[in-house]
């Protein structure tokens, strides 16, 4: 099965850092954030990742391709261990280009031919999950059991609902996924059907592609994936699973910094140094 990673956004919240460098290549300490998300998909058993990139962001694809000249040069300089680390970033990744930023639904639609006629995952690289079980694996399991399309969910505060797709869901049986009856993109708090938010992980049946093609522009004038899934929910073909891992929003600078700090703290060499550095900071 394939996993789609839409990475065509403008990265406005990181400007000017993202004027030239794609947001997805900003480092989480020593690896680009997108590599963590690609590895989540591969760890969950997906065999190919399809990146959806804008024409300016093809460097993301290059990050996952072999770099034999660089590796040869490093070996010639006696840096064989570093050469191995660079070589180890090759991944089964392909890319499709989204020529214009017409929304998340449109971006996913651009992957239609690359995905083909089989269920597929969507992982938004702004949502990073840290935990032992890859977040997308939880969705794949729910898909295997129910045969329905699946959304990853997380409860947010009332003040936060207008930043997410929000679902109206019903519990069916103890421990079973929630049945999603409706969903709305970025509602005002007063209009939100609940506080259960879609958090960047989807496991979708390929019939979704047809629905995307019929979806008119919605919130922000963009073709929204949330809107494309409404008909599926109405027909009973959509479920949701609350995700168990810790989520970080690396689509904004503080979230990326928090994720980098957590990664550094868990690192055998950087962890002790970071703790020392933080302990030595003058108290305000
Ligand atoms: C997208 C989706 C939204 C979802 C969110 C999760 O919004 O459109 O439904 O809740 O990702 O991060 P974006 O954050 O790209 O505006």
Image: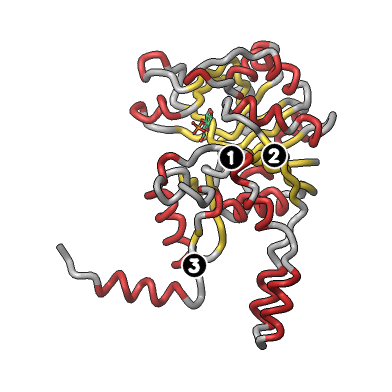
Q: Quadrant of the N terminus?
A: top right
User: How far from the left and from the top, in percent, is residue 263?
Assistant: 49, 63
Identify the residue shown where x is 50% and y is 23%. Answer: 166
User: How far from the left and from the top, in percent, is residue 49?
Assistant: 73, 46
Q: Is residue 127 left or right of residue 160?
A: right
Please indicate, yes or no, whether residue 238 appears anywhere in the rendered image.
yes
User: How far from the left and from the top, in percent, is residue 254?
Assistant: 37, 49
Between discs 2 and 1, the one toward the N terminus: 2
Q: Is residue 116 left or right of residue 278?
A: right
Identify the residue shown where x is 60% and y is 41%. Answer: 7
Outermost left residue? 284
Outermost right residue? 117
Viewer-nearest residue: 280 or 135: 280
SS type, badge 1? loop
| Residue 214, image quadrant | top right
Viewer-nearest residue: 105 or 260: 105
Residue 162 against residue 13 in the figure, above or below: above
**What is the crowding at mark 2: few (fewer than 14 residues within 10 Å), some, or many (at least 20)?**
many
Q: Nearer the observer, disc 3 or disc 1? A: 1
Between discs 3 and 1, the one toward the N terminus: 1
Residue 266's disc number: 3
SS type, badge 2? strand
Q: Which residue is mark 1?
A: 124
SS type, badge 3? loop
**What is the crowding at mark 3: few (fewer than 14 residues within 10 Å), some, or many (at least 20)?**
few
| Residue 89, image quadrant | bottom right
Q: Are marks 2 and 1 in contact (CB under 8 Å)?
A: no
């Amino acid at each position: 099965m394939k996993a789609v990673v839409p990475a065509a956004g403008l990265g406005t919240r990181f400007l000017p850092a993202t004027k030239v460098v794609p947001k997805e290549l900003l480092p989480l300490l020593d690896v680009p954030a997108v590599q963590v998300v690609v590895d989540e998909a591969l760890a969950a058993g997906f065999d190919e990742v399809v990146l959806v990139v804008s024409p300016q962001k093809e460097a993301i694809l290059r990050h996952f391709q072999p770099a034999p000249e660089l590796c040869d040069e490093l070996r010639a300089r006696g840096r064989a261990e570093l050469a191995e680390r660079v070589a180890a970033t090759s991944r089964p990744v392909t890319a499709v280009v989204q020529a214009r930023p017409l929304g998340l639904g449109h971006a996913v639609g651009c992957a239609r031919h690359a995905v083909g006629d089989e269920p597929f995952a969507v992982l938004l690289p702004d949502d990073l999950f840290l935990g032992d079980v890859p977040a997308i694996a939880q969705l794949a399991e729910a898909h295997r059991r129910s045969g329905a399309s699946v959304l990853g969910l997380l409860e947010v505060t009332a003040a936060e609902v207008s930043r997410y797709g929000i679902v109206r869901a019903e519990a069916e049986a103890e421990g079973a996924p929630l049945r999603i009856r409706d969903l709305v993109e970025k509602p005002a708090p007063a209009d939100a059907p609940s506080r259960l938010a879609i958090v960047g992980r989807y496991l979708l049946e390929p019939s979704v592609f047809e629905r995307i093609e019929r979806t008119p522009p919605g919130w922000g004038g963009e073709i929204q994936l949330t809107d494309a899934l409404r008909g599926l929910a109405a027909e009973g073909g959509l479920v949701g699973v609350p995700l168990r891992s810790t989520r970080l929003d690396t689509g904004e600078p503080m979230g990326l910094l928090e994720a980098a700090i957590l990664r550094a703290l868990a690192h055998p060499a950087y962890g002790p140094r970071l703790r020392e550095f933080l302990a030595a900071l003058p108290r305000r």
